Amino acid sequence: MNITEIRVHLCDEDKLKAFATVTFDNCFVVRNMKIISGNKGLILCMPSRRLEDGTYKDIAHPITVEFRKILEDQVLAHYAMEVKKSAKTGA
């Protein structure tokens, strides 16, 4: 499975830094991944839903640690490019 497109939409909030949309093999898309500022740096959070008990459960997520790392590295690289581009344009 290949990541064929990553779109990052920056947010101007304290912890929530951006939303990401990732397309796989030009045929499957996952929306509403969140880039969050955590205690140890940026974290990629999978789309989730709130359960009746107030906890959250991922709707879609990587199964292997290896693929999670690949996905996180690529999305965070795109995030860094968007931040840099935004800083240049003053947006």
Image (cartoon, helix red, strand yellow):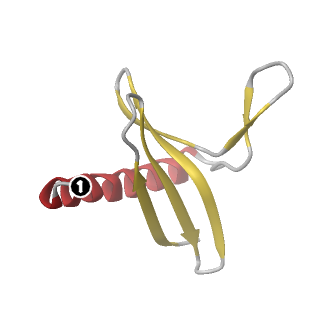
Q: Nearer the viewer, residue 61 or 85?
A: 85
Q: Quadrant of residue 77?
A: bottom left
Q: In the image, is 19 to the left or to the right of 59?
A: left
The x, y position of residue 67, in whole percent, is 54, 54
The secondary structure type at the circle numbered 1 is loop
At label 1, the amino acid type is Ala
- Asked if residue 16 is positioned above or below residue 28 in the image, the reply reads above
Q: Position of residue 4 (x, y in %)?
A: 49, 75
Image coords of residue 32 (percent x, y): 59, 51
Residue located 66% across and 72% down the image: 28
Q: Residue at x 45, y 66 (%)?
A: 6
Residue under pointer 1? 91
Does residue 1 lie above or below 39 as drawn?
A: below
- Residue 22 position, x and y percent, is 54, 64
Q: Residue at x 40, y 45 (%)?
A: 11
User: Which quadrant of the figure contains the N terminus?
Assistant: bottom right
Q: Residue at x 61, y 48 (%)?
A: 64
Crowding at mark 1 (Cα within 10 Å: few <14, some 14-19, many 20+): few
86 w.r.t. 54: above or below: below
Left or right: 52, with 40 as reference point? right
Count of marks placed on residues:
1
Q: Residue furthest front?
A: 91
77 left or right, relative to 36: left
Rendered image quadrant of residue 85: bottom left
Q: In the current view of this chain or complex, which residue is farthest to the bottom?
A: 26
Q: Nearer the viewer, residue 70 or 49?
A: 49
Q: Is residue 27 left or right of residue 59?
A: left
Outermost residue on the right side: it is 52
